[in-house]
Amino acid sequence: MKGLILSGGKGTRLRPLTYTSAKQLVPVANKPVLFFGIESIVAAGITEIGIIVGDTKDEIRAAVGDGSQFGARCTYIEQEAPLGLAHAVKIAKDFLQDDPFVMYLGDNLIAGGIRSLVDEFRESTANAQILLAEVANPQQFGVAELSADGTMVKKLEEKPPQPKTNLALVGVYMFDKTIWESVERIEPSARGELEITDAIQDLIDRGLEVHPHKVRGWWKDTGKLADMLEANRIMLDSADLHRQHSEVGTHSRIEGRVQLGENVTLVNSLVRGPSVIGDDVRLENVFVGPYSSIGNRCVLSSCEIENSIILADSEIADLPARVDGSLVGRGVKIRRSDAKPKAYRFMLGDNSEVSVG
């Protein structure tokens, strides 16, 4: 069995951050979202992985490499434009051949990984297996209707204006070789894409077996700020954060589950977990509150951070109000100026510079 990870999207919902960075490499708990997907696939016993890449291909290649750091072998497949999930499957045929495969959207996170789901597909007679989750806004997803006994998928519809169920497709799919005929048969949708929902519906129309699996734990599509922050909270809640690689000075305190990287300097600061602090970080007169992730080489002074993701090489100094619920890109500088607002909420792209008061 092989793996196919889709990492070619533009990440428009996370702009301006994704103007200069792949959305799949935005970190959750100081680890790129894409890495969680690769690790889940490898944990399921799949080590041959194809990665669909687009405009950010060089950045993805630089981060993932040949896959050996994950115990895998990665092959990169270039998609000239975001022409749909079924198009991504179509262009991966030379890599996948007739092997069954799992397709994983590179900006998704699923509790507990996918090993049991892959085993379930391997042991079944299904031609495809889709993951479903109950959502409050099904009109924004592909939506499934099931058979009366809930064991088979009866119909799929992409982003219906009036959904018949609240069962949304989660970003993990499993297929056997029968998918090839379906991706060849379907036509582009109104938005000009080859929809994977249409390809799966073609499997159903041909009388093939498409099994549903309802996700019982959490699942996150990290395409928006609120989802990124919630994913960060979830991962920090479940991560092993007891390791500390740096000394804590006499005028600084660590409370709760906090992971400190190498060469972290704490001066008159309080870090309250669950939080993770990267390597070579300096914190001086700083409060870092729960659910914060501070990237490598950040320098923070005279400020308060909580429930936020601060990417590498950023500097934040002299802020009179707390930074809360924020996502700050790489190499960003935030400093105090004359104006005096009482609170801040940021979503900043790489190399931004902001003066506040």
Image (cartoon, rainbow, N blue to C red):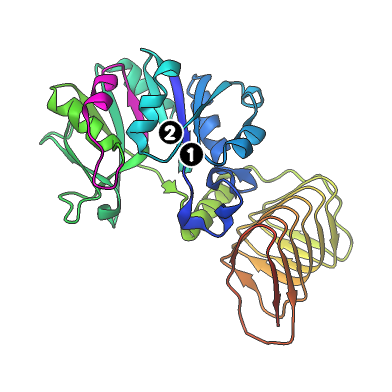
Q: Are marks 1 and 2 in contact (CB under 8 Å)?
A: no
Residue that label 1 marks: 8
Query: Quick one: label 1, few (<14), some, or many (20+) residues within 10 Å?
Result: many
Indicate the secondary structure of the residue bearing disc 1: loop
Front of the two marks 1 and 2:
1
Residue 263 position, x and y percent, is 85, 48
- Which corner quadrant holds the C terminus? bottom right
Q: Residue furthest top?
A: 98
Q: Residue furthest left?
A: 148
Residue 43 position, x and y percent, is 52, 25
* Distance from the alpha carbon under mark 1 to that under mark 2: 12 Å
Looking at the image, residue 297 lies above or below residue 211: below
Q: Is residue 117 visible?
A: no
Dividing the picture into quarters, in which one does residue 285 lie? bottom right
Q: Earlier in the sequence, mark 1 or mark 2?
A: 1
Amino acid found under the numbered disc labelled 1: Gly
Describe residue 62's horizontal placement relative to residue 77 as left or right: right
Looking at the image, residue 337 lies above or below residue 181: below
Describe residue 45's horizontal placement relative to residue 177 as left or right: right
Residue 102 position, x and y percent, is 40, 25
Amino acid found under the numbered disc labelled 2: Tyr
Q: Identify which residue is drawn at 18% across, 49% down.
A: 165
Q: Within the magenta stretch, is there residue 164?
A: no
Q: Identify which residue is drawn at 24% across, 28% down.
A: 211
Q: Residue furthest front?
A: 80
Describe residue 66's horizontal placement relative to residue 201 as left or right: right
Dividing the picture into quarters, in which one does residue 111 lie? top left
Indicate the secondary structure of the residue bearing disc 2: strand
Residue that label 2 marks: 104
Q: Which residues are magenta?
A: 172-192
Q: Identify which residue is drawn at 15% across, 50% down.
A: 164
Q: How many numbered discs sit on the rendered protein?
A: 2
